[in-house]
C-alpha cells in the first residue's frame, strides 16, 4: 500500500524542553490515522512540523513522496487542514470564503460542489458570525478541500460541538475515507479515535509509545476486563487481594476497582466474600478494556512500564 505520510526521527527542542524525541510514524493511503496524547505530550509540535509551520531540529517529513522541508510549496498543495477553530471575518459568507480561498489555486474544487458536499447551501450567503459551531466546522472542512488535497489533517475537529454536530462530523470523516482520502486526526476524544481510526499512535513526553489498530492496542493491554463495584460497607483490601485472578486493585471508600482476564469467577468470589462479611453489593460494572484504559496505562506516571507495540 502506498505511504502518503512518513515521519522519521522527528526532534524538536524549546530551550531545555525536548518536545519531540525521535517521533516516527507512517500513514498509508486511504486510512484514518489518529494521533493521541495528553496535553504537553508533543502532539501539537508534531502536527506543526508536518504542516511546515515549525522547523524541526532533526528528522524528516515526507508527504506523498515529497520531502516537506525541500519542497514546501508542493507539499502544501497536497495537504488540506482544518484546525480546532476557524477565524474568519464576521461578515464574510461561506460562498465568499470559498471563492476567496479558491482564488489562490490554479486547480480548485467548484464552490457550489463544496457547499453541497458539506451541507452549506442553505447558509451559503449567511454571515460567518451567524453560523453555529457545527456549521463553522463544516465550512472549515470545505476550505480544507478547496484545492483538492490528497491528505487531510484534522486537529481536534470536534472540540466544542454538540452531540448532533459531532455525529455529523464523524460521518463526514468516514466519507473522506470512502472517497479515498488519507486522514490524520488529532483528538483528545478517545471514543472518537476508537470509532473512526484504522490505526492510532499514542505520544507521550515527545515519544511514540504505542502504534496499532485500536483493537490491537486494547488486546495487548494488561487487564482484559475491568470490574468496578460499590458495597454497603468497607471491605478489607487485604481480603480482596486474596481473590483469584485479580490485579491492579484500587479501593476508594465503599468502592473498588480491579482488572482480571475473566470476570465471572472473580465476581462470584467477590459475592461470597461480601456475604461472609455481612455486606450488600450496591453497584457492579464489568467491561472490557477500552482505548481509554490503554491510554491511561501508557501516559500516567505510575504506569510507564506498560509494554505495548510500537
Image (cartoon, grey):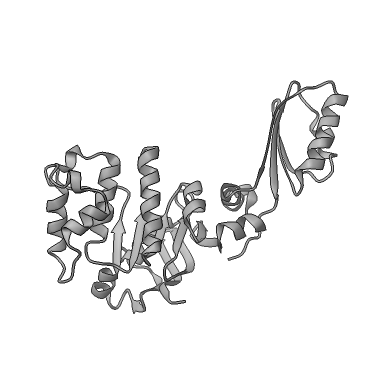
- Residue at the spot x=50%, y=48% of the render? 190
Question: Is residue 46 found left or right of 248 in the rendered image?
Answer: left
Task: Measuring from the top left, give residue 90's x and y in whole percent.
Answer: 14, 42
The answer, for residue 148, to whether it is visible in the render is yes
Q: Residue furthest right?
A: 276
Residue 245 image position (x, y, % from top left): 81, 46
Q: Nearer the viewer, residue 108 or 38?
A: 108
**Relative to 294, residue 20 above or below:** below
Q: Nearer the viewer, residue 261 or 207?
A: 261
Whether 14 is drawn above or below 71: the answer is: above
Q: Residue at x 46, y 46 (%)?
A: 189
Q: Where in the figure is residue 4, as x and y percent of width and height?
A: 40, 73
278 to the left or right of 233: right
Is residue 156 among the parts visible in the rendering? no
Quadrant of the image occupied by residue 62: bottom left
Q: Quadrant of residue 45?
A: bottom left
Viewer-side residue, 300 vs 150: 150
Q: Position of residue 32 (x, y in %)?
A: 44, 61
Name the residue nearer the viewer: 66 or 2: 2
Residue at image point 29% right, 62% down: 80
Q: Is 209 displayed left or right of 60 in the figure?
A: right
Image quarter (top left, top right, bottom left or bottom right) of the C terminus: bottom right
Please state if 266 lies on the left or on the right of 68 as rendered: right
Q: Looking at the image, is 6 positioned above or below residue 169?
A: below
Label count reads: 0
Amino acid at each position: 500500500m502506498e505511504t502518503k505520510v512518513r515521519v522519521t526521527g522527528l526532534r524538536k527542542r524549546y530551550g531545555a524542553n525536548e518536545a519531540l524525541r525521535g517521533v516516527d510514524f507512517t500513514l498509508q493511503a486511504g486510512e484514518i490515522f489518529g494521533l493521541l496524547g495528553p496535553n504537553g505530550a508533543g502532539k501539537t509540535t508534531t502536527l506543526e512540523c508536518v504542516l511546515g509551520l515549525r522547523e524541526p531540529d532533526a528528522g524528516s517529513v515526507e508527504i506523498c513522496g515529497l520531502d516537506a522541508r525541500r519542497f514546501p510549496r508542493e507539499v502544501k498543495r497536497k495537504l488540506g487542514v482544518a484546525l480546532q477553530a476557524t477565524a474568519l471575518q464576521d461578515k464574510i459568507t461561506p460562498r465568499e470564503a470559498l471563492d476567496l480561498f479558491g482564488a489562490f489555486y490554479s486547480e480548485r474544487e467548484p464552490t457550489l460542489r463544496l457547499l453541497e458536499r458539506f451541507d452549506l447551501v442553505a447558509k451559503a450567503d449567511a454571515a460567518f458570525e451567524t453560523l453555529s459551531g457545527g456549521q463553522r466546522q463544516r465550512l472549515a472542512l470545505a476550505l480544507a478541500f478547496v484545492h483538492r488535497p490528497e491528505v487531510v489533517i484534522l486537529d481536534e475537529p470536534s472540540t466544542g460541538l454538540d452531540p448532533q454536530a459531532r455525529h455529523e462530523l464523524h460521518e463526514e470523516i468516514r466519507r473522506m475515507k470512502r472517497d479515498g482520502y488519507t486522514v490524520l486526526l488529532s483528538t483528545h476524544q478517545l471514543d472518537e479515535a476508537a470509532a473512526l481510526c484504522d490505526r492510532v499512535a499514542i505520544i507521550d513526553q515527545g515519544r511514540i509509545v504505542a502504534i496499532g489498530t485500536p483493537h490491537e492496542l486494547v488486546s495487548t493491554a494488561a487487564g482484559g476486563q475491568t470490574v468496578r463495584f460499590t458495597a454497603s460497607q468497607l471491605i478489607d483490601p487485604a481480603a480482596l487481594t486474596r481473590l483469584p485472578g485479580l490485579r491492579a486493585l484500587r479501593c476508594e471508600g465503599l468502592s473498588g476497582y480491579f482488572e482480571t482476564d475473566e470476570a465471572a469467577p472473580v465476581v462470584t468470589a467477590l459475592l461470597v466474600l461480601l456475604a461472609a462479611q455481612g455486606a450488600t453489593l450496591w453497584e457492579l460494572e464489568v467491561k472490557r478494556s477500552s482505548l481509554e484504559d490503554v491510554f491511561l496505562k501508557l501516559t500516567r506516571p505510575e504506569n510507564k512500564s506498560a509494554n505495548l507495540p510500537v
